[in-house]
Amino acid sequence: MRRNVLLRLFLAAAVLCILLPAAVLVLWSAAARWSWPSLLPERWSARTVRELLFGSQDLWRLLGSSMSLGSGAAGLSTLIGLLTARAVSLYDFPGKGLVRFAGLLPLLIPGTVFATGIHLVLLRLGLADTAAGVLLVHVMTALPYSISILTDVTAALGGALEEQAAVLGAGPVRAFFAVSLPELMPGVLSSLSMAFILSYSQYFTTLIVGGGRVKTLALVLVPYIQGGDRSLASVYALAFTGSALLVSALFEALIRHWQKRGDRL
């Protein structure tokens, strides 16, 4: 009984820690004046929300660039992660351990060192301060997570189904797409979701590699917070959080759909 009470108190505190900052953001986004120690705003105004949603195109451009980078990074990291996962899970070859280690390397290097080093390399390649360079770094950041997720699901599935399909006359490509890929889809979708959110929320690497020229929602959010315009910063923060949660919910719905589909089959 006592344990149940403590668990409920813990859950209530966790929910409060999540909802309270969100509620403060909502209030600040509609506040024209909110002085300490007033519990609620003294004056209300929807001017900032109207200007950003209907008067200015900045928010929509930032959302578009962030979504594009996130989608590209998610797709590329998942594709590379799937190929790597199949290689290390289903085949034996010299240097297999080195491939596993290389896939985890971006996690082992401090973020500052990683961003600075890759920026120097991109300067020589002519990709610094470009969207392509930022996309490449986002892929490298998300790749370890994609490899980890997809290696687990590929190893759990194994290669027996594809071997049986080959016995029945299916080629390697057809066997993969017809037999293995449907079973791997929950893992693939999980990888896409994780990679997208990681790319979408990148600030430091985007700032260093993009040189301030590649604008994303996460990149412009911090200066608005530091600038003291709490109303404007709150609207951007709500747009950032809401869009990220929407994408996460979409992927979660797709994962559940594929899991139910697999159970029916």
Image: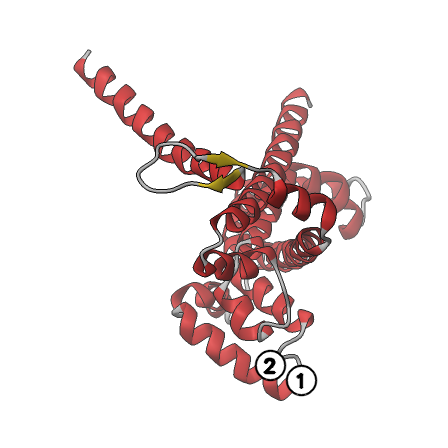
Give the crowd class for mark 2: few <14, some 14-19, many >=20 residues within 10 Å.
many
Give coordinates of residue 115: x percent, y percent: 48, 73
Mark 2: amino acid: Leu
Residue 94 in sight here: no
Checking the image for residue 126, the label placed there is 1
The residue at the point 58 percent across, 63 percent down is 138
| Quarter of the figure with the N terminus | top left
Residue 204 in sight here: yes
Residue projecting furthest to the left: 2
Disc 2 target residue: 122
Q: Are marks 2 and 1 in contact (CB under 8 Å)?
A: yes
Mark 1: amino acid: Gly
Checking the image for residue 102, the label placed there is none
> Dividing the picture into quarters, in which one does residue 181 lie?
top right
Using residue 173 as the reference point, say whether residue 249 is left or right of it: left
Give the crowd class for mark 1: few <14, some 14-19, many >=20 residues within 10 Å.
few
> Dividing the picture into quarters, in which one does residue 175 lie?
top right
The residue at the point 37 percent across, 42 percent down is 35
Give coordinates of residue 179: x percent, y percent: 72, 39
Compared to residue 119, the image places residue 242 above or below, namely: above
The residue at the point 54 percent across, 37 percent down is 30
The residue lying toward the viewer, choosing from 112 and 252, is: 112
Task: Say which element carries label 1.
Answer: loop
Q: CA distance from mark 2 to mark 1?
A: 6 Å
Compared to residue 264, the image places residue 13 above or below, namely: below
| Quarter of the figure with the C terminus | top right
Compared to residue 260, the image places residue 106 above or below, namely: below
